[in-house]
Amino acid sequence: MQNSLYQKCQDYQADYVKLWEQLVNIDTGTGYGEGLVRMGGIVLRFLEELGAEIKTVDSDTPGAGFNIIATFSGQGTGSVLAMAHLDTVFPPGTAAKRPFRIEGEWAYGPGVSDCKGSVALCLFALKLLQETRYGDYGKITCLFNCDEEIGSPSSRDLIQRLTKEHDYVLCCEPGQFGDGVVLSRKGSAVLKVEVHGRASHAGNAPQDGRNAIMEMTHQIRQMSALENPAKLTTLNFTTIQGGDRNNVIPDYAVATADVRVAYPEELDRIEQAARTIAQQKAIPDTRVEVTLIRHNPPFPRNESTDALIATAQQLYGEIGKTLLTNAAGGASDANWAAAAGATVIDGLGPVKGGINHTDKERTAVASVAPRLYLLSRLFMELGRKG
Ligand SMILES: [Zn+2]
């Protein structure tokens, strides 16, 4: 299909790959300030050349890099926020061990997919708008944050504030295998259960003990029933500890369950029900405490996201491509945006092909130009709409 904008995306590919390589070859594990500052510097220079209005916000952790907010103002009415993160899960030294490389159809290297391909994609989409002198948008903002991989503790407020200042949020996590985007993500929490019993000699006076492990098995069985398949809520006990000597009735046990929810109210339900269940004890004189530690809120499926996806699918169709959709179990910054009321879609980056967060991470090189086209067209259409 002939399409001059898509042709331009293809023409950018070589320069895109150069930048991609440069970014992947800098270690930027979360908290590794030296690398994050170096990579941030490259991103800042690119944005300066495009004439962006730029702000940086230091991480709350001293020396752990900074977040970059780049804004472009046009003559239109709509406003769009795009996000991609600078940090990876890999420690210093990884890039030297397995630097960026392209082999066949795939690009490899630490963070090649998650999320350096997307950082470069955002930059080139902005470049495309500048070079084609497209100005029919109110405001386009890109946020590059430095702590996504640990749940964005020091950028989540920034994400939520920016979300409220824009009509749409485009989260550029890696494209889903098979050329998909993400229309919902689960939220996560940890349910911690502690049992306090009474220690006693297991041989001489077992009757005087109150066995914390035995009470824990009872609690685990009860609390596992808080799963709710109809609402996609899962609850799995994944750690347990208790007792340290074989001849002592244990006076303490602790267990944690991984909780995933598709709907925010499910976390409240679980918290309340777990408290009630904790009172239903099998062994009197034990004390059971439960705590629900909330991590990311869910990014639930909703009508406004569905409409945004329909727009994206239509735009992708302009170059003869079909955009698939996926519900994801893991969380991302789209969760923070959704919790702040955003109309958001996720997974707009180049398409992943391996297992991210491992040395098998890889990206389909052929997906770069189509995904660049999609992101640029979304900026244009959503900027115009408002
Ligand atoms: Zn990511």
Image (tube, grey):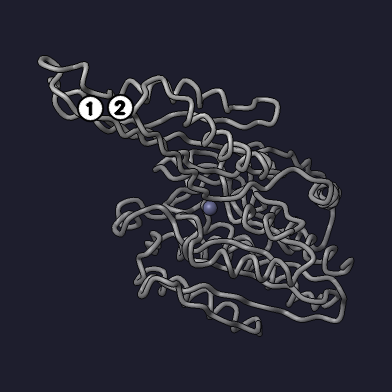
Q: State which tag comes first along the sequence, 2 or 1.
A: 2
Residue 303 makes an appearance in the image: yes
* Label annotation for residue 250: 1
Q: Amino acid at mark 1?
A: Pro
| Mark 2 vs mark 1, CA separation in Å | 6 Å
Does 158 sit above or below residue 302? below
- Provide the secondary structure element on which disc 1 rests: loop
Q: Residue at x 72, y 70 (%)?
A: 128
Q: Is residue 309 left or right of residue 332?
A: right
Instruction: Please state the horizontal and vertical placement of residue 180, each as a whole percent of the image.
Output: 69, 41
The quadrant of the image that shows the C terminus is: bottom right
Q: Is residue 145 left or right of residue 214?
A: right
Marks 2/1 in contact by CB < 8 Å: the verdict is yes
Quarter of the view holding residue 120: bottom right
Instruction: Please state the horizontal and vertical placement of residue 182, each as a whole percent of the image.
Output: 68, 44
* Label annotation for residue 306: none
